[in-house]
Amino acid sequence: MMQKHLCLFIRRNLTILTCFFFVGLAAESAQAVVKYESSPVLNASAVLPESVFESDQYKIDQRVHNDGLVNSYKVSSPHGDFEVTSTVALYKLVSEIEAIAAMVKVEESDSYKKSLKESGSNTVEGVKNLFSDPVDSVKGAGKGLSSLFSRAGEAMFQSSPGETEDSRVKQLIGFSQSKREIAYKFNVDVYSTNQVLQDHLDRLAWAEYTGGITISVATLPFGGPAKVVYSSSNVVRLLNELIALTPPVELKKQNRQKLAKMKIDPNLSDLFINNTHLSPRQQTYIVAALEAMPEAANREVALMVALQVKDTEVAMAVTTLTMMYAGYSKHVAKIKQLYPVQRIMGARDHKGNMVLVVPIDYLTWNEKLAGALDVMSKASANKGKDKNQIWLLGSASDTAQAKLREKGWNVKTRVAEKLGINNTGILK
């Protein structure tokens, strides 16, 4: 019965973090009368940098609703109206809107229109043949056939295509490769759930795939979205390039092999890889984050947390959470152990600190938090100053910070720079 209630709660909430706080309610004393803060409505212009809030490509609604943990934003643009949960998701969205505007300029160019007209009949006929008789349409794709056997095995027998992956046919004929390369050139996630972005990526990919137009970085009408600070290290650039240029089934195969080298139970790895709510990109980031913590025991805990992902918002939160731990291990102190904390994870570093890193936008003092802290404090043997630490991607109210300190927790806010995390929740 308890499991049923927990699953219901996960479906109703937008981040895995709320699940963590919910479970702690069992420890809240019924006798104590505590005054909790109500969920606030924040001003976007006060929460966000001016460079993000002010744009001729989109408009962010001033009213930002906060549930005590994460913010919800409404964004309007010439390309559609959007709603996103979390500031990390907002940064990703505005970069996508800027990229869409650039794509529209390419689609409106004379060279694009001319090339489509010239290749139009071949495109229509090719698409018709592809979906009416896909087997015959791909018979001639035998070049490099030996390299496809392992991919085919992964695709057909080991994992299902994720929610954001292209169809099997599109992947086999090479369309998806064109699409991934274009997304990489525009600095956007090819597995994004933004349908407007996907529509534009499809149009440009079909045009390039049929030979009608060649899209190069030199011909793009912009130099990359200016509102988001992107990863710059060689390691992360290579990781992003790998994600962009590698078919999803091959990514899954590589991720499975890396998890095996970490000696993670193959059954758990299978469940993780087969979770279609996590995109191949997110799975690859999570695996890379675990690779970046080689000294950490119990790395399988991260996969257990990821198994709870049931929607886009939770998938983004779990990915960011895991990257934050990798950042902590790299820039602050080596993680020695990951361990389950209710339905999320905590860590101990080599200094003996008990650490929670959480991608929270704005934390208020609320019932969920109070109950969870009681559970956490009882589980911790640390009594010294600063030994119990909470690292927040965003900030916390004065009341929340005071209550956390009373309970023996040292609060770190706006920790992205200290952890080496960029605006979209990825390691720099």
Image (cartoon, helix red, strand yellow):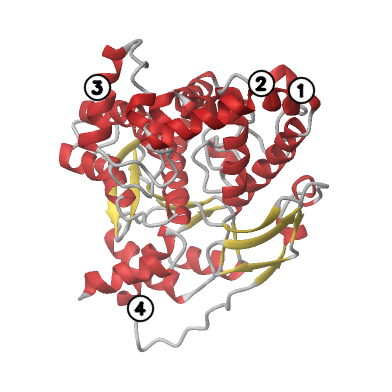
Residue that carries the numbered disc 1 in the rendered image: 111
Disc 1 or 4, which lies upstream in sequence?
A: 4
Query: In the rendered image of this protein, does residue 174 appear above or below residue 379?
Result: above
Please name which of the two marks, 2 or 3, marks the residue nearer to the observer. 2
Task: Check whether the beta carbons of the residues at disc 1 and disc 4 lie within 8 A of each other.
Answer: no
Identified by mark 2, the residue type is Ile
- Left or right: 8, with 416 as reference point: left
Disc 2 or 3, which lies upstream in sequence?
A: 3
Residue that carries the numbered disc 4 in the rendered image: 28
Q: Residue at x 52, y 48 (%)?
A: 193
Q: Mark yes or no: residue 257 visible.
A: no
**Distance between the Cα atoms at labels 2 and 3?**
32 Å
Task: Check whether the beta carbons of the residues at disc 3 and disc 4 lie within 8 A of each other.
Answer: no
Q: x, y (%) of residue 388? A: 40, 54
**Distance between the Cα atoms at labels 1 and 4?**
66 Å
Disc 1 or 2, which lies upstream in sequence?
A: 1
Residue that carries the numbered disc 3 in the rendered image: 150
- Identify the image quadrant of the N terminus: bottom left
**Distance between the Cα atoms at labels 1 and 3?**
39 Å
Task: Check whether the beta carbons of the residues at disc 1 and disc 2 lie within 8 A of each other.
Answer: yes
- Left or right: 218, with 292 as reference point: right
Please name which of the two marks, 1 or 3, marks the residue nearer to the observer. 1
Callout 4: 10 Å neighbours few (<14), some, many (20+)? some
Identified by mark 4, the residue type is Glu
Q: Mark yes or no: residue 406 visible.
A: yes
Identified by mark 1, the residue type is Ser
Name the residue nearer the viewer: 413 or 40: 40
Disc 1 or 3, which lies upstream in sequence?
A: 1
Please name which of the two marks, 1 or 4, marks the residue nearer to the observer. 1
Q: Quadrant of residue 3?
A: bottom left
Residue that carries the numbered disc 2 in the rendered image: 213
Q: x, y (%) of residue 225? A: 71, 35
